[in-house]
Amino acid sequence: MKVLLADEYGFCFGVERAVEMVEEAVAAGDTVRSLGPLIHNDQEMQRLASQGVATVELPIQITRSETAVIRAHGVTPEVQRDLESRSSKVVDATCPFVTRVQRLAARAASEDRHVIVVGSPDHPEMIGVKGYAPDHAFIIKDESEVAGLPRLKRPLIVSQTTIKAQTFFDTAEAIKSKTDDEVEIVNTICSATRDRQDAARALAGEVDAFYVIGGNHSSNSRKLLSVCKEQCDKSFLIETADEIKEEDLAGVERVGVTAGASTPKWLIDQVVAKLEGINLPSH
Ligand code: F3S
């Protein structure tokens, strides 16, 4: 049985960078506390926990001797200052793509312009971005919420990094009805999610079975599964190699593997090794 990996899979740039920054702090002997779960993968969180990395919900839970970590989603400037005042060391693992959105929002607010961010208002990334333009920003999910906006002053329109491009452009178009001023539209969508889906789609037509490695509750992993299923009936979402069932692989000659953006490489390696070790009866 041949095991084929999709061209793009697993940790996105921002998550990989955040985990590396945490590991560097651990290696330096720091007691590391992440504000909110560093990544949405139980196995990786357990691995980090075994190195003493713990998650806290509020800055107030961090003591002076501990190292505070800002995860890839970023935080508001207020929360950042709070962390800096409480902790002797703050590791800022905000993904640079998120930092870009924060800076754009801050710049527009400093010019007294409105900022419209297309995304989910309760997503941590959005809460952080809004903090950079507190009195100027509106977060709306899609074009259905445009009617609720006031008249806008020289608006800047940006996006949450993980939304669909079509949602962003349709919403941006609708927002133009809310102003007579010039509208600045900056597409700040990160391509990591789409790249993983495109690569899975490209491979799904060439294999007899497909394993997507990711959390059951992870929406990007479930989306990957549905992309694979469109072309490959035998597509499975698994969290670990233990969930591979040999009976599912009867008659399979080529098996595809991909993983969600929060799935660490060591888990992927375990799945590939297990699949490569399976000896199916020849037909
Ligand atoms: Fe950054 Fe994109 Fe990942 S914004 S955290 S690289 S999904």
Image (cartoon, rainbow, N blue to C red):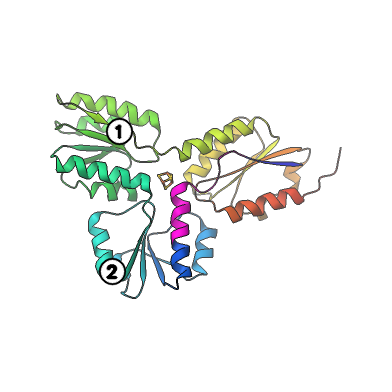
Q: Dividing the image into four equal quarters, which quarter contains ligand 1?
A: top left
Q: Position of residue 191 (x, y in %)?
A: 44, 37
Q: Which mark is residue 186?
A: 1
Q: Is residue 78 left or right of residue 255?
A: left
Instruction: Specify the quadrant that holds the C terminus.
Output: top right
The residue lying toward the viewer, choosing from 68 and 210, is: 68
Q: Position of residue 227 (x, y in %)?
A: 55, 34
Instruction: Write down the residue under mark 2.
Output: 60
**Placement of 69 over or under 74, stated as above or below:** below
Q: Is residue 15 magenta?
A: yes
User: Which dot, 1 or 2, sits closer to the camera?
Assistant: 1
Residue 211 visible in the picture = yes
| Lower sequence index among marks 1 and 2 | 2
**Placement of 235 over or under 68, stated as above or below:** above
SS class, disc 2: helix
**Magenta residues?**
6-21
- Image point 17% across, 42% down: which residue? 109
Residue neighbourhood size for the residue with mark 1, other residues' Cα within 10 Å, grouped as few (<14), some (14–19), many (≥20): some
